[in-house]
Image: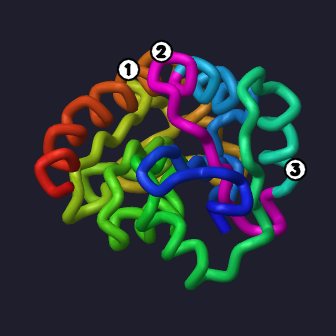
């Protein structure tokens, strides 16, 4: 799959913009801006992953990004996604199943949280950075949103691009030494 797009293992960031409901989805345009800055500073390629129901978000990222990205949303079976995540240099995405799959694959993770508490739901077993807007938020209590309709919550939308880019670059730098030692 990667060879078809001329992407080498460990030379790309896997990005997942989807999540089970809107309150967990960072805006596609912010993902696009972060992608442009990360790719510009590192030279890493970007591969978008997700299910077919996430094509709208990934299409918006492709349209907004100045950096060419490979959009594989809707094109991968779960076992293929897991294999791809194993080859990624880093995973950047919302709190979601693919975020935990990336951790299970051994890939460093930058996870974006809004409605849930990263202390409880952060990826385990890999180097990771979990970002969440500063609290207390009027809609977040405990681990879940207090709003009557969490699908309309927008906590993760309060995350700015700068901390996401900074966390990604920090985690890339922190894990580069480990990866070089393994090679």
> In the image, 66: left or right of 136?
right
Which labelled disc corresponds to residue 162?
A: 2
In three-dimensional space, the C-alpha distance between marks 3 and 2, rounded to whole angstroms, equals: 24 Å
C-beta proximity under 8 Å, tags 1 and 2: yes
Q: CA distance from mark 1 to mark 2?
A: 6 Å
Instruction: Give residue 166's mark.
Output: 1
Residue in the picture at 43% in, 28% down: 133
**Crowd class of label 2 (few under 14; some 14 to 19; many from 20; radius 10 Å):** few
Lateral position of residue 160 relative to residue 19, left or right: left
Element on which disc 3 rests: helix
Counting residues from the start of the chain, the first of labels 3 and 2 encountered is: 3
Q: Nearer the viewer, residue 145 or 15?
A: 15
Q: Which residues are magenta?
A: 38-54
Q: Residue 167 at x, y = what percent? A: 35, 28
Residue bearing the label numbered 3: 56
Helix, strand or loop status at disc 1: helix
**x 33%, y 42%: residue:** 130
Within 10 angstroms of label 3, few (less than 14), some, or many (20 or more) residues? Answer: some
């Amino acid at each position: 799959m990667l060879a078809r797009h001329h992407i080498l293992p460990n030379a790309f960031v896997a990005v997942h913009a989807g999540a089970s409901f809107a309150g967990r989805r960072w805006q596609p345009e912010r993902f696009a801006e972060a992608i442009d800055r990360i790719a510009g500073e590192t030279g890493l390629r970007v591969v978008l992953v997700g299910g077919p129901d996430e094509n709208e978000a990934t299409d918006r990222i492709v349209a907004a990004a100045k950096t060419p990205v490979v959009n594989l949303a809707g094109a991968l079976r779960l076992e293929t996604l897991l294999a791809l995540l194993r080859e990624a240099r880093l995973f950047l995405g919302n709190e979601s199943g693919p975020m935990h799959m990336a951790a299970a694959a051994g890939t460093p993770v930058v996870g974006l949280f809004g409605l849930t508490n990263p202390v409880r739901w952060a990826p385990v077993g890999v180097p990771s950075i979990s970002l969440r807007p500063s609290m207390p938020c009027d809609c977040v209590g405990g681990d879940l949103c207090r709003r009557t309709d969490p699908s309309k919550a927008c906590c993760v939308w309060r995350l700015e691009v700068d901390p996401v880019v900074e966390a990604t670059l920090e985690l890339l730098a922190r894990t580069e030494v480990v990866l070089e030692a393994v090679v």
